[in-house]
Image (cartoon, rainbow, N blue to C red):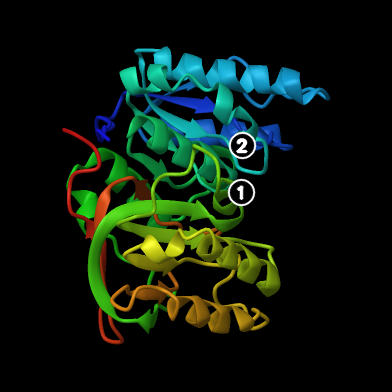
């Protein structure tokens, strides 16, 4: 598969906003996000049906597809940010014009339910895209870590070569090792729902990252077992677990997660490293990850090093 690299975003260029998943119940957050993007030096273009939904999901899907296609076709738009996650993106996958996207490669950013769109776009077009903050949930009042990683990754071709974890997030070395693989992943619930469809990228030789929120340990166990029973996770070169709570320091966090992660780490290839605590998930301190890019992970009890081995945006 040919890998497509979007052009780096420059000050003064246009960021388009779309809502391929759920709508935002607080429209003032959209206004605040637009203000933030403009104050950061960019122009903002809202899609025609942004944040619009109908009782009939068929109508809503037509709005979402129209806006997605229009933003990729619009030559003035250089990056596309999703409004929020939630639900609904998986319904679009079999009607997306992937040829249009491949002919107009540009930055696409979102996570959570947007995992479905992110993985499908990479699988069908080879376009490296970005699992990162969304307008109405993360860019209303972003903290400095989230800002630095977002703009660094999207604007500087060399920034993603070294991605540091947030200082308060404790990294766990479940299995030490050093590997290079193509970065694939996102929200575990959404990713597991794509198993058996033509929209899930190949796991062979990949570096898998995942997170989830508001899911009890037994459901996380079930979804991970599904990836192994489908013969997928064993093919990965490494496994990176992000945050499975909105607060990584939560004393009430279910510590059965740790035993589950260790259990599945032991089912990986003998030389496959496995880590926990990546600064990725439904959290304020959110790392922006380049889906589809070749990345290298080194993890040991004493060392964590992670980053892309190639440019994720072009100059």
Q: Let me know if residue 231 appears in the view.
A: yes
Residue 193 numbered mark, or none: 1
Which residue is depicted at the point 48% across and 46% down? 133
Looking at this view, is 125 or 34 the one in front? Answer: 125
Looking at this view, is 57 or 98 the one in front? Answer: 98
Answer with left or right where residue 186 lies relative to residue 27. Answer: left
**Spot occupied by residue 223 in the image (x, y as percentages of width and height):** 61, 62
- Which mark is first along the chain, 1 or 2? 2
Answer with left or right where residue 16 lies relative to residue 48. Answer: left
Q: Is 4 placed above or below 251 here?
A: above
SS state under label 2: helix
**Spot occupied by residue 201 in the image (x, y as percentages of width and height):** 41, 44
- Circle 2 sits on which residue? 90
SS state under label 1: helix
Looking at this view, is 63 or 286 the one in front? Answer: 63
**Spot occupied by residue 249 in the image (x, y as percentages of width and height):** 56, 78
Which residue is depicted at the point 45% across and 57% down? 286
Q: Quadrant of the N terminus?
A: top left
Residue 63 numbered mark, or none: none
- Determine which quarter of the picture holds residue 5: top left
Alpha-carbon span between mark 2 and mark 1: 9 Å
Which residue is depicted at the point 44% across and 63% down? 233
Q: Are marks 2 and 1 in contact (CB under 8 Å)?
A: yes
- Determine which quarter of the picture holds residue 26: top right
Looking at this view, is 135 or 74 the one in front? Answer: 74
Q: Let me know if residue 299 appears in the view.
A: no
Q: Quadrant of the C terminus?
A: top left
């Amino acid at each position: 598969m040919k890998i497509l690299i979007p052009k780096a975003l420059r000050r003064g260029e246009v960021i388009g906003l779309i809502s391929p998943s759920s709508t935002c119940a607080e429209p003032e957050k959209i206004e605040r996000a637009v203000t933030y993007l403009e104050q950061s030096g960019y122009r903002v273009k809202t899609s025609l049906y942004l944040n619009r939904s109908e009782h009939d999901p068929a109508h809503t899907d037509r709005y979402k597809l129209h806006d997605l296609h229009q933003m990729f076709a619009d030559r003035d738009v250089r990056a596309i940010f999703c409004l929020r996650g939630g639900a609904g993106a998986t319904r679009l996958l079999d009607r997306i014009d992937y040829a249009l996207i491949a002919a107009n490669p540009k930055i696409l950013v979102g996570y959570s339910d947007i995992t479905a769109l992110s993985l499908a776009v990479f699988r069908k077009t080879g376009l490296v895209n970005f699992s990162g903050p969304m307008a109405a949930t993360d860019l209303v009042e972003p903290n400095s870590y989230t800002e630095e990683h977002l703009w660094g990754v999207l604007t500087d071709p060399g920034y993603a070569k070294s991605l540091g974890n947030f200082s308060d997030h404790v990294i766990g070395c479940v299995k030490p090792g050093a590997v290079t693989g193509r970065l694939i992943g996102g929200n575990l619930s959404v990713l597991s729902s794509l198993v058996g469809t033509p929209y899930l990228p190949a796991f062979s030789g990949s570096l898998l990252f995942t997170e989830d929120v508001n899911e009890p340990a037994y459901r996380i166990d079930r979804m991970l077992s599904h990836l192994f029973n489908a013969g997928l996770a064993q093919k990965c070169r490494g496994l990176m677990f992000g945050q499975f709570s909105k607060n990584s320091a939560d004393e009430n966090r279910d510590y059965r997660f740790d035993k589950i992660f260790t259990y599945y780490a032991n089912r990986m290839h003998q030389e496959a490293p496995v880590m926990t605590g990546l600064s990725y998930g439904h959290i304020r301190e959110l790392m922006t990850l380049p889906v589809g890019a070749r990345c290298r992970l080194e993890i040991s009890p004493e060392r964590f090093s992670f980053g892309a081995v190639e440019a994720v945006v072009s100059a």
